Image (spheres, rainbow, N blue to C red):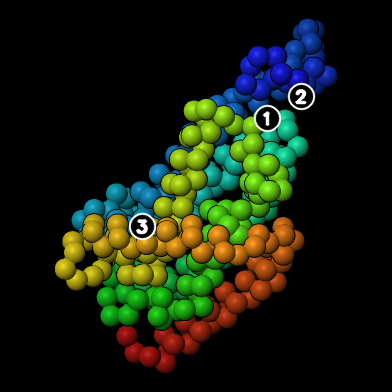
Amino acid sequence: MERDGSAFAPHPGRACAGAGQPRVACTAQARSAAVRDCPCSSVSGCVTGVRGAAAGAGLVAVDLATGALFVNAALAYVMVALVMAGWAPDAAYALIGGWRFLGQLIAYSMLIVMPLTAVAMRAQSLATTEIVASQAVLWNVVAQPLGFALFWLAAMALAFVPPFDLPVAPGELAGGVFAEYTGVRLAIVRLGRLLLVLTLALAVVVFFLGGWLGALLPAWGWTSVKTLGVAAAMLAIGRYVPRLSPDTVLAWAWKLGIPLALVNILWVGITLLMVPR
């Protein structure tokens, strides 16, 4: 890749010719559009996920019957944004970071959906308001500790915070997927990453920590306190754990995490049959 004064210049040899058309740099416009759009795509995906989660009684932005799955589906925008961010600069480290995130997201998305299946079984609904209401007596973190642990680790992996920060890997890929970004674009992608952490922290609160339920404080107050506490824990805990290798991260998800998630679903099904509601 050669620099020509623009943010990202195409490789001079990567030109294509159409039938009867002069040779043009066909990838230049595509890469430029990707560089321009992927920071905003990451932010919009996180905002969409927040809209699907309940923020408090009477404050639900979109009360969908499938709200729990909608939150997970919104993460697809983040996946596309990170893959584009890795491909667009035409740089090796950025491309490696983008593909690392793709493999990581596919593996750990299963560990988002499968614990949510057990949560929906207990609530007998996928609506986030019903899921929170089902925790009035006992929070899911107590009723489903294994599901909570799996969901927490999957949330950290999808937010690529340490020790799951393989897409950026400062000491290994020199910034990885964000290595070629500077200025306003870098500020936007960092904002998108923080919003991703807050979105996943809100999901943890709604699905396992009772959502807005609590005494003394109003609904929005409990939601805010719990979400900020979970986000702070996600950002702090990984600082004391060494970064895992890519093959170890994926092996844990496919060989250990998914079987444990199936055990959690079986456990919840047995308890629902044995314990009267």
Q: Nearer the viewer, mark 1 or mark 3?
A: 3
Quick check: marks 1 and 2 in contact, CB under 8 Å? Answer: yes
Residue ID for mark 2:
1
* Residue drawn 71% across the image and 48% down it: 172
Return the x and y of residue 63 as percentages of the image width and height. Answer: 31, 54
Residue ID for mark 1:
89
Give the SS element for disc 3: helix
Question: Which three-letter amino acid code belongs to the residue tagged 2?
Answer: Met
Residue extending farthest to the left is 216
Question: Which three-letter amino acid code belongs to the residue tagged 3?
Answer: Leu
The residue closer to the viewer here, 172 or 28, is: 172
Residue ID for mark 3:
228
In which quadrant of the rendered image does the C terminus lie? bottom left
Give the SS element for disc 1: loop
- CA gap between label 1 and label 2 equals 9 Å
Badge 3, how many Cα within 10 Å: few under 14, some, many 20+? some
Give the SS element for disc 2: loop
Badge 1, how many Cα within 10 Å: few under 14, some, many 20+? many
- CA gap between label 1 and label 3 equals 34 Å
